[in-house]
Each structure stands twice: as C-alpha cells, then as structure tokens.
C-alpha cells in the first residue's frame, strides 16, 4: 500500500479506472436514455435506442406550446408543466423561508439562552425528528378537510395547507443550525452582553450574520425536500391546476394514458434547474447533510 | 452543550424601552386569537378551538410576562413542533380507535342533516320551471300550471315564497344561466295557492317532495315510507331499524380496540400484514446495507492517492443524488416497463429475456432495491469520504509495514474506526427507508397484489404505503384501520429513534472523551 511495485500499481490503476467506467456507464444509463427518448418520435419505444428521426415535438409540448407535425396535425400540450413548476417553486420558497425563520430563532435559543427544561426539550426534539410527517397523513387529511369547511383557503386543494404541513421540517434543521451555533466562540456573546446588547440584539447583529452559510444550506435542503414530496401533496391537492411537479408528473405514466416521450422532455425541463443548483452547492451541502438530514 | 452555562441569565436586570407598546400588541393579538378560538368552537370544531386557545395562552403568558424573556425565542419553534407534528401524530393514533371511514365519515349532527334532507319526489306534481330576472331579484315561472312566484333573491339560505297565477314573463334565463343559480334554487320552497310545497327536484323541475326521514326525538328518526322508528346506535355509528338494519350514512364513533383486533385476528388482514411487515424490514435493511457497501467501496477507490480524474468521477457519481428523486423514480418506472421499456428492449436483444418487473413479486422487489440503491449510494459515498479522511494515516502505514494486505488493513484498521460515527446515520437511513413512501408510491404503488386478501395489499407494499392505500386508494377510505396500523409503525419508529439517540450519545461521548 505504501511501497508499491510499478507493475502492480499500473494493473491496479487500470482495474480502478475500468471499474469506475463500467459503474458510471450503468449509473448514467438512465440519463442518456431519457435525453434520447425526449427527441424520439411518438410516446412508445420504437426499437431504436438512438432516435432515428429526431423531433422537437415533446419539447414544444413541455414548454406549453402547440406542435404542428409534418402531416399538418396539431398536437396540444397534455399537461401544464410550467404551471406545475411555478406551483412547486412558489410553495418551496415560502415553506423554506418559514422553516428557516423558525428554526434559526429556535436554534439560537437552544444554543445560548438559559431556559429551564432545555435539555429535555432537545432530547424530545431529537426523538420527534425521526417521525416523518407522512406517517400522520390520515390526520393531516382529516384536519385540513375539517379546516376547509371553516375556510376553503386552508382546506384540501389549497397551497396554504401544503405550506403549513411542510413547516414541520423545522425539527431536522433546528438541530443542524444549533450544531453550528454551538461552535461559535462564547467570547462573542459575552462581549456583546458587556456592551449592553439584549439577547435579541446579540442574535440579530452577531449570530444572524455568522449563520448565513448554514442558513443557505438549510434553505436549499428544505427547498429540495419540499420539491421532492409526493405523499402529502398527493393527498392534499386534487385539481390539476393546483398540483406540484411531483404529483403532476405521475400523470404522464398512467397505465391508460402513457406519454413516455412527453414525460422525458418535461422531466429534463423540470429536473435540470434543481440538479444544477444542487451541483453548484454540493460542497457546502455535504457538511450540512452529515449533521442529520437523510435523503436516501 | 459546553456553551449552555455561558448564556444569558434571567431578564430582571434588563430594562425595556417601551413595555406598554409590547403589552398592547400582545393583548391585541391575544384577543384576536381568542376570538378565533371562540369562532372555531361555535362552528363545531371544538378540538381546533382548544388548540388555538392553548397556543394563545402560551403566547400571552410568554410574551406578556418579563420573567419568560428567554422562552420567547423558543416559543415559535416549540409551538410549531407541537401543532404540526405532535398534534397530527396524536390525532392519527386517536383515529385508530374510531370507525372513521367512507361509511362513517360525518359528525352525528351532519349525518342527521343529510338524512333529513333526503326526499322522495311526487311524480304527479313534477313540472319544468324557468327563471326570469326581475331587476336585482328573480321570479320562478312554472309554465305547466301557469304560476309565477313572488320575487326571490336566490342568495340567502332557505327561502319560502308564494306562487300566484300569472302571465309568462317576457324574458327567461337560458337553462345554462339557470343552472348557475343552482345552490339558491335548492334551498327554495314554493307554496302553490292550494298549499302544496314545491321544491327543486333536479336540474329542470320543481315538485312536491316528501322527506324520507323525520326527526321525532333526540336519538330517533321516523322513516316516512314504512313508518318505522330508527334509533341512533352510538356504538356502531349508524341509525338502525328495530331489526338492527343499518341505514347509511353513519357517523364517527369510538370503537375501542376493534381495528387492532381486525389486524391481529382477521385472517384476511393478518396474513398480508405479516408479509408486508417482513418485507418492510427486509427492504429497509437491504437498502441500507446496499447503499453503505456501494458508497463505501466508491469512497475507498476515490480516496486512493494514485487515482486521476477524481473530481470528474466524483461529480458524475453524485449525479443520481442531485436529480430530484421523484423524477428519477418515474424515469425508472418507464425504463422498467414490461412491454415497451428500454431495459427489457436491451435484455431481449442481448439474452432474449423479458422479465415481468411489475407483475412478478420477487422481480418487483429486486427492481425496487436496485432503484433505491441507485438513489441512495451517493449520499453514503459523500459521508464515507468525510469519515475516511479522519482515519489517521500512520495507523494504516504501521499495519502495511507489518506486511498486512490492503484488504486486511481496511477491515482491521479503517472499518472499525469509521463504523461508530457512521452508526447514527445508518440508523437514520434505516428509519427513512422504513417509511420510504415516495419510492413505493411512484414506482409500483405496492403492486402486484397479493391474491386472496380481504383488503388490497401488494407484494411490494411497505407498512407506510399499505396504510396510504387503505386510507386514500381503492378500498373505501378506511381511515380508522389506517390509523391503527400507523400506531404500529409509530412503535417501530420510536424504537429505531431511541436506538439512534443512544448511538448518537455514544459517538458524542467518544469524541469528547478523546
């Protein structure tokens, strides 16, 4: 391992690169396929892995435009993909801002303010964060069904209801941000206190600016978590124009109306922005991830 | 927790610039919330009213009294956790002890309203109608009997007006415009000159309607058709005839442990439950094992000092993690499609095989595990790369100098050092997969179905997706039964959660003890 003979080393290198290439081919296969399918004619596999007569039909439809085929027939978009994207982004942004505000303040309190029973609350929080919201789906449905009779704005099929449910993600992130605040030197807040700052001022002018990097991580993680949710949105959202991307995309692969080609273009269109954001932020996300959030 | 004692002390020593301003705002908000709670109570939502009342009390006490200054920071977060997580969890468990389902969906009062509003149309009196606009109000015109109603607004609840013989109005609304006024028409009663009450009996006609049920007592309805007395049975949640025949719809009542007895004793439920229970554990365990093995292997290769193009490999390898999960899962759903999926296309060209990924239970399980490992290995790889860097180089060098093979170094030096910090994360991943609803719902929906069961259950259903199906799909919204199964899941998750808590403590103690 430390002292290696050149011949052995070369064989090992070839083996390592060979393994990596084969593995990558297997892993990246779906990506190649989905790009190819999005340019292929029709909505079924036609036998060719490489499109023989590339067409932009699926892409026109994904962008919500009518497409005129060579024979003059006009195809209309099957689903409002851009509207679904907008719904997802809107809900994701509002929910993430809410989660960020609540969890940053709570994390500061848990890290710095002396409160009776704090350790108990922290332990409770740690235990509760393992319970995914999806487990309480039946109750969530019953609650918002009842609230909808009071005011439809908070009932089934409203975005406000969905955002309220997503606020429950704070448990994960209070923990993440608290870990970050714990690592901040206590001399800082002592100095602030001596200068006469109240805890709120210390939070506002010292901790908040320091927390920007971890807040960015939490924001992106919450946003991705919200975008990826299917169960809650599928229970709370009924009408097509209110759907989020995750719920709507499922419609493409219905047994009775199978739109494989249209789905491919829509999937790339909607998946690409999030993928790019994730890849840019990934170095910063990794540290945040290991502090508690689990995706796969 | 090293910083806990360095925090701020009680607030008595601080002076506040404008305490009256804060108190006014708190009082105003408190009053608004109190009104909201009272409103919720009035419209028969006492539970939500009580919750809002509790939140209000907490808010006023903590933001009103100075001695709770510190708690003000924690209040929003704790209130959110209690309202958005603890309350739904408790509510789900409570539903597990009720018969809440599509048959017993409503409250008792609502059930009576629904039953009383049912009526039988007398075909003798049924006649078409038309609506005429008369300035701000409307008139109903019955052409067959030549009767015209007094003006009606069609917006208020329960209107009752008289009919007089009259001339046909000049301009009548089109049927489509009349249908738009449906809700107003439905709560309208028209009294003919010979004192017959006519009500809306469909989109196009008015008729004399006899109510099917009349409330004759606190817990009693009389059925008009046969004069039988129906009594409310508050144990089953139905109105019943003297012979015990239930008249739907029913209302929600507590049923004690009935749902749990069904799970544990009814054969058609217990059989599939056991198989689903076993598969849930197998699925979560094998998934964690798979992603951990693949992720660790890749991390070890990527850490090798002689490997080139590390950054490129790394970026390409985390791609499956960067793409939103729901899109990848749906892509796989299409690629694995038995009839026209690309995977079967290639397999047939190479080996002449067309595996039934969606109709053969075992193959469906293999597919699910493959997709889940594809989705999850990058996360484990990223974590493993971090932990591998923390293993001291000199330990490995010493072992290598002693003549140990690299495999042996890995298993005796490296692995034992990274397992303890990894353990809490592995347990968390297990808990996550235990409830990995998104994967199952988007990939197989639990199918293929297990044959011969009382309630629909699939070969690839995990407990969470099974409850989802019970509550929201094909089997009649059995919320009560779903709630009962959720309680079982809670128990398992609580055990996993506690194990994670212990593992976390150990890892933390080890780190600080060093």
Image (cartoon, grey):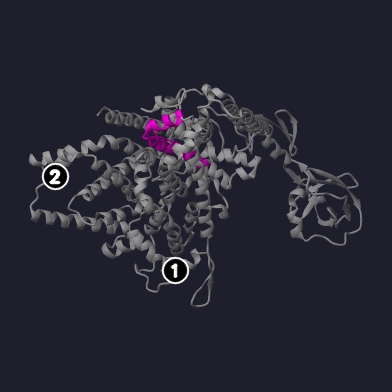
Q: Can you identify the residue that label 1 sits on?
A: A42
- Seen in the picture, residue B288 relative to B322 is either above or below; the reply is above
Q: Which residues are magenta?
A: A165-194
Count of numbered marks: 2
Q: Is residue A186 magenta?
A: yes
Q: Can you identify the residue that label 2 sits on?
A: B406
Residue B267 percent across, percent down from the top left: 43, 35
Q: Is residue A18 magenta?
A: no
Q: What chain does badge 1 belong to? A: A
Q: What chain does badge 2 belong to? A: B
- Seen in the picture, residue B94 relative to A292 is either above or below; the reply is above
Eye-nearest disc, 1 or 2: 2
- Left or right of B448, for residue B397: left
Residue B195 percent across, percent down from the top left: 88, 44
- Seen in the picture, residue B148 relative to A119 is either above or below; the reply is below
Disc 1 element:
loop
- Depth order, front residue of B334/B213: B334
In which image quadrant can residue B407 be found?
top left
Residue B295 at least partly seen: yes
- Depth order, front residue of A122/B89: A122
């Amino acid at each position: 391992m430390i002292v290696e003979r050149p011949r052995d080393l070369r064989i090992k290198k070839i083996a390592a690169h060979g393994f990596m290439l084969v593995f990558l081919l297997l892993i990246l296969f779906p990506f190649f396929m989905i790009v190819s399918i999005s340019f292929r004619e029709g909505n079924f596999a036609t036998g060719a892995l490489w499109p023989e007569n590339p067409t932009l039909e699926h892409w026109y439809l994904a962008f919500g435009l009518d497409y005129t085929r060579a024979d003059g027939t006009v195809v209309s978009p099957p689903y409002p993909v851009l509207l679904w994207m907008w719904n997802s982004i809107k809900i994701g942004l509002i929910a993430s801002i809410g989660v960020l505000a609540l969890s940053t303040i709570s994390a500061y309190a848990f890290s710095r303010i002396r409160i009776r029973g704090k350790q108990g609350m922290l332990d409770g929080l740690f235990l509760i964060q393992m319970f995914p919201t999806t487990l309480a789906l039946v109750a969530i449905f019953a609650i918002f069904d009842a609230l909808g009779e009071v005011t439809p704005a908070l009932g089934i099929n409203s975005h406000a209801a969905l955002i309220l449910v997503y606020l429950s993600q704070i448990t994960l992130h209070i923990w993440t941000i608290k870990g970050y605040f714990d690592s901040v030197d206590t001399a800082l807040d002592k100095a602030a206190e001596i200068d006469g700052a109240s805890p709120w001022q210390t939070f506002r002018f010292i901790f908040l600016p320091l927390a920007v990097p971890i807040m960015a991580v939490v924001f992106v993680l919450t946003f991705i978590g919200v975008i990826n949710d299917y169960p809650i949105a599928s229970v709370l959202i009924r009408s097509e124009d209110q759907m989020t991307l995750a719920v709507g995309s499922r419609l493409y692969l219905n047994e009775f109306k199978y739109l494989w080609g249209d789905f491919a273009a829509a999937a790339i269109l909607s998946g690409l922005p999030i993928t790019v954001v994730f890849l840019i932020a990934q170095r910063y996300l990794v540290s945040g991830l290991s502090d508690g959030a689990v995706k796969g | 927790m090293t910083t806990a004692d360095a925090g701020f002390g009680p607030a008595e020593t601080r002076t506040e610039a404008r305490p009256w301003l804060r108190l006014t705002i708190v009082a105003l908000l408190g009053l608004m919330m109190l009104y909201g709670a009272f409103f919720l109570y009035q419209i028969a939502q006492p539970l939500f009213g009580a919750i809002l009342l509790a939140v209000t009390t907490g808010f006023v006490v903590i933001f009103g009294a100075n001695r709770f200054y510190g708690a003000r920071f924690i209040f929003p977060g704790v209130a959110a956790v209690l309202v958005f997580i603890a309350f739904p969890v408790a509510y789900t468990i409570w539903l597990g002890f009720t018969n809440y389902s599509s048959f017993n969906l409503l409250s008792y009062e609502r059930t009576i309203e629904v039953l009383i509003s049912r009526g039988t149309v007398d075909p003798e009196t049924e006649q078409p109608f038309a609506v005429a606009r008369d300035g701000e109000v409307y008139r109903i015109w019955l052409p067959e009997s030549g009767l015209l109603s007094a003006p009606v607004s069609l917006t208020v609840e329960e209107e009752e007006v008289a009919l007089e013989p009259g001339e046909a109005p000049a301009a009548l609304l089109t049927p489509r415009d009349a249908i738009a006024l449906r809700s107003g028409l439905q709560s309208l009663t028209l009294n003919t000159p010979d004192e017959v009450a006519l009500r809306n009996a469909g989109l196009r006609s008015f008729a004399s309607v006899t109510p099917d049920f009349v409330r004759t007592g606190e817990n009693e309805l009389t059925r008009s058709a046969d004069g039988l007395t129906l009594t409310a049975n508050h144990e089953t949640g139905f109105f019943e005839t003297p012979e015990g025949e239930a008249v739907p719809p029913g209302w929600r009542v507590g049923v004690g442990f009935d749902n749990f007895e069904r799970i544990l004793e009814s054969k058609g439920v217990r059989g599939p439950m056991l198989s689903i229970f076993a598969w849930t554990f197998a699925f979560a365990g094998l998934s964690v094992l798979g992603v951990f093995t693949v992720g660790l292997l890749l991390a070890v290769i990527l850490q090798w000092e002689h490997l080139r193009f590390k950054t490129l490999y790394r970026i390409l390898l985390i791609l499956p993690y960067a793409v939103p999960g729901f899109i990848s899962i749906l892509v796989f759903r299409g690629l694995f499609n038995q009839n026209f999926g690309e995977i079967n296309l290639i397999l047939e060209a190479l080996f002449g095989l067309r595996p039934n990924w969606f109709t053969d239970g075992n193959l469906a399980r293999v597919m699910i595990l493959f997709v889940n490992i594809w989705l999850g290995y990058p996360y484990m790889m990223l974590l493993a790369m971090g932990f591998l860097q923390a293993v001291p180089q000199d330990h490995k060098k010493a072992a290598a100098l002693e003549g140990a093979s690299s495999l042996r170094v890995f298993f005796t030096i490296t692995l034992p050092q990274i397992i303890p910090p990894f353990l809490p994360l592995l347990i968390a991943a297990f808990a996550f997969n235990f409830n990995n609803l998104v994967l199952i719902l988007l990939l197989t929906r639990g199918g293929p179905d297990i044959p011969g069961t009382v309630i629909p259950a699939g070969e690839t259903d995990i407990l969470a997706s099974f409850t989802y199906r019970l509550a929201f799909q094909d089997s009649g919204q059995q919320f009560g039964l779903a709630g009962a199964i959720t309680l079982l899941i809670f128990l398992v998750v609580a055990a996993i959660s506690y194990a994670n808590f212990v593992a976390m403590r150990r890892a933390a103690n080890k780190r600080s003890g060093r």
